Amino acid sequence: MYLSQRYSLEDFNEVLDKNNPEVFKIKNKTGEGSFKSYNVFPGVFVVYNDFDMYECSSTFKGDSNMFCIDYCKEGRMEWVCHNNDYLYLKQGDMQMTVRKHHGKDFGFPLKKYKGITIVFYLDEANKSIKKSLDNFDVDLYDLRNKLCARDEPFIMRTKSGIEHVFNELYEVNHHIRDSYLKIKVVELLLFFKTLDGDKDREERTYFKKSQVEKIKQISKYMIDNIDKHITLEALSNKFGCSLTSMKRCFKEVYGDTIYNYMKSYRMNEACILLKESNDNISNIASYLGYDNPSKFAAAFKSVTGITPLKYRKSG
């Protein structure tokens, strides 16, 4: 859950306490986002997150007796951990985490994040689920202790046996939503009970703040010089980082190699210019760093499937 600094914990709890879901909207200089929360059981909330922004801050303070399940459906989320190390949740990732050391800053390096957070306030949730479901044998405290030992996040790629649950949470008919969400939360808990905290955990690399900031400077530098094709060696020398660590950290932050990232960025810019400007294709090619229109057209077609001229004429 990601709140703008202008929202307090009291504001958030007020939304969670309402029977009808409300959409909280966040806006800052990097874009905007929203989340919608549904109360499923007492102490259990399903939150739909949708962000089209690069970063936001939260005043939310985690409860020591809570944990959350996060699922990234689209985009990428950057966690700033309590020790100022950075961790990334990518499309198809699922994590369980306590919010004891919940950081206040979140980044979305691709300016896109869409996902689900399921929040459990343990005391209330444990009682309410067991009261609603006779003989339900999943204890939330046991689950937290097994998968989040030492308060470390448990992260894994979603498996075929569970990814459908998250996808179905997006397809629920509003007429049956209340009962359907209950069923899906229970299904998730049963799945998590089958996991082994050591064997099923996927180890992730944490990156220092200085490393991430340098990678973001590299991205900005390349975008500011989009008309130039800059070699990896030149970037490594200019920003004073080893070639290996630069490539590894860049891929973790942005989810792709430097070459593919810039190719995608150029083609996105090309689509905008072809639709929204009257510039001829030769000028667009030059602006994006291509020596001639033929090379640009070949690159554009390799990404979009059609030539720049056909794309422009398509409307």
Image (cartoon, grey):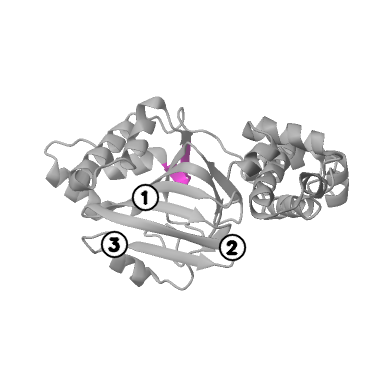
Q: Secondary structure at mark 2?
A: loop
Ranked by sequence position, the earlier of labels 2 and 3 is 3
Residue 262 horizontal/vertical position (percent): 72, 43
Lateral position of residue 246 relative to residue 186, left or right: right
| 132 lies above or below 210 | above
- Residue at 69 percent across and 51 percent down: it is 273
Q: Are marks 3 and 1 in contact (CB under 8 Å)?
A: no
| 33 lies above or below 159 | below
Q: Which residue is mark 3?
A: 16
Residue 36 horizontal/vertical position (percent): 35, 56
Residue 138 horizontal/vertical position (percent): 24, 37
- Residue at 42 percent across and 64 percent down: it is 25
Q: Secondary structure at mark 3?
A: helix
Q: Which residue is mark 2?
A: 30
Look at the image and tell me whether residue 170 can be seen: yes
Q: Which mark is residue 67?
A: 1
Ranked by sequence position, the earlier of labels 2 and 1 is 2
* Amino acid type, mark 3: Leu
Q: Is residue 92 magenta?
A: no
Distance from Cα at disc 2 to Cα at disc 1: 29 Å
Name the residue nearer the viewer: 95 or 84.
95
- Residue at 13 percent across and 45 percent down: it is 132
